[in-house]
Image: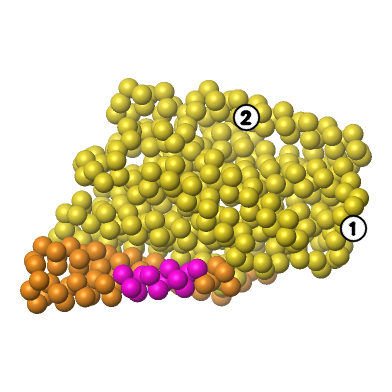
Chain colours: A yellow, B orange
Amino acid sequence: MENITLLIGIVIVTALVFDFTNGFHDTANAMATTISTGALKPKTAVAMSAVLNLIGAFISVEVAATISKGLINEDSGIDPAVVLAGLVGAIIWNLLTWLAGLPSSSSHALMGGLIGATIASVGIGAVSMSAVVSKVLLPALAAPLVAGIAAMLATKLTYRITRKTEERDVAKGYRAGQIASAALVSLAHGTNDAQKTMGVITLALISGGLLGADADPPMWVIASAGIAIALGTYLGGWRIIRTMGKGLTDIRPAQGFAAQTSSAVTILASSHLGFALSTTQVCSGSIMGSGLGRKGGTVRWNTAGRMLAAWGLTLPAAGLVAAGAALLTAQGDWGVIVVTVLTVVISAAIWLASRKEPVDHTNVNDVEPVAPDTPAQLGVPPQPAVVAGVGTGTADAEAESSGPSAAAPLSSSAS
Amino acid sequence: MDIDWAALGQVFGVSLVMTVGLVGVFTLGIVGTRTSSKAGDSGPALLGRVGAYASFALCAAAVVYGIYIIAA
């Protein structure tokens, strides 16, 4: 521990920054529908999710390095500079998709980054392409289908059972159920995603010779990874929450409950039965499924299409950024410093761009905040199929435009 | 290419059955409490309420099992 080099230090900090972006990128998975149906107030929702993330990071200490072990052959000379470049690619892709308000998988961004950096520094031979197909591409197709079909059928069932009951009479019960399933998603997220960061930091420590080859993550690694993801979650990726909660489809409490339960069950089934699915893709799929399951419900395919495009781009885009970063970090200390400075500058630029049309807990639901228990909220008629658009009040006009229009910088910078 | 179709099929089956089952049971519970509170304490209403509590208990057990899976 006594000789942490500059490079290892930067890798650890960068890994924690990635963890933080992972947290705020993925708040939406657990909480978007909970917020949009009014089951929890926005701030309460993110606070609860953050606490459960933190708990989740501690309750399972299963070795956390699966993300790097399966895809990249460690014997072929992975060094901390490559890990750093991979993290940079993942962070920048996470920030760009956040700016555009698009949910995309943080895990896929990280895998893409590590793959790109490895190709640039070691060559294509070090990456297992069949692993890319079986662990990334196929799950990306399967996740929304599995969760979506389950959520669609569950939504149909709820409307069938309650067809003789007033919707507002049962809404309260569904909101309570939603909170429970959202809690499970948050807990699972803390366990899975914080462990990825722990795995990366541990890998960097091992590759720098600071830890033995088969070492478990040290306690300080577990604690800092848990805290970083919880802070990110608490900050809340409001842009993505808006897209998932309001942009894909109009979610009523029964649908929110069906979608959230489908997400929780699918995530737990996939991690338990050994076929890893991306949380983001599972949750997006179940939200769309619940939109299709309600009579008269529509999915905004325009928004869904942009989201799918972002999923397709995640691996190559994060990989490309990471490859560029890897060429620089390979130059030694000055290259590492250049990459670090560039990352800070680009991140700051993206943050500044986001301030032009801020989305936060006050305007995340587009409409004027309604107290969770007032029946008036249920009286809102189905909204027209305008992308992310609601626009019932004057204050909404400026807030609303950020969703769709923010996609422009994404497509130009990614292509 | 090493794709574990069996695991994928299992995930699909389990997700579908568990989601639809849990959502259905929970919905029955909500409807049960709803009708029993309207009808007062007569026979069928009591039955409805007991059924509703049983449904919620089943869902609570599922949540506990979920936590167990995450922690294991």
The image quadrant where one finds the C terminus of chain A is top right
Q: Is residue A410 left or right of residue A256?
A: right
- Judge by depth and name the residue closer to the eye, A256 or B32: B32
Q: Tell me the tag on residue A350.
A: 2
Instruction: Write the residue at 79% across / 35% down.
Output: A340
Q: Residues within 10 Å of mark 2 (few under 14, many from 20)?
A: some
Residue corresponding to mark 1: A209
Range of residues picked out in magenta: B56-67
On the image, the x and y values in percent for residue B9 come to 51, 72
On the image, the x and y values in percent for residue A42 come to 42, 42
Instruction: Write the residue at 50% across / 68% down.
Output: B67
Residue A116 showing in the rendered view: no
Q: Are marks 1 and 2 in contact (CB under 8 Å)?
A: no
Q: Tell me the tag on residue A196.
A: none
Q: Considering the numbered disc 2 on the image, is that residue within a helix, a strand or a loop?
A: helix
Residue A367, compared with residue A10, is above or below; it is above
On the image, the x and y values in percent for residue A21 come to 62, 43
Q: Is residue A213 left or right of residue A395?
A: right
Residue A162 showing in the rendered view: yes
Cα gap from disc 1 to disc 2, whole angstroms = 35 Å
- Judge by depth and name the residue closer to the eye, A4 or A157: A4
Query: What amino acid is at disc 1?
Result: Gly
Labels 1 and 2 within one chain? yes
On the image, the x and y values in percent for residue A341 come to 78, 31
Q: Chain of mark 1?
A: A
Q: Considering the numbered disc 1 on the image, is that residue within a helix, a strand or a loop?
A: loop
Q: Is residue A34 left or right of residue A220?
A: left
Answer whether residue B63 is magenta in the image: yes
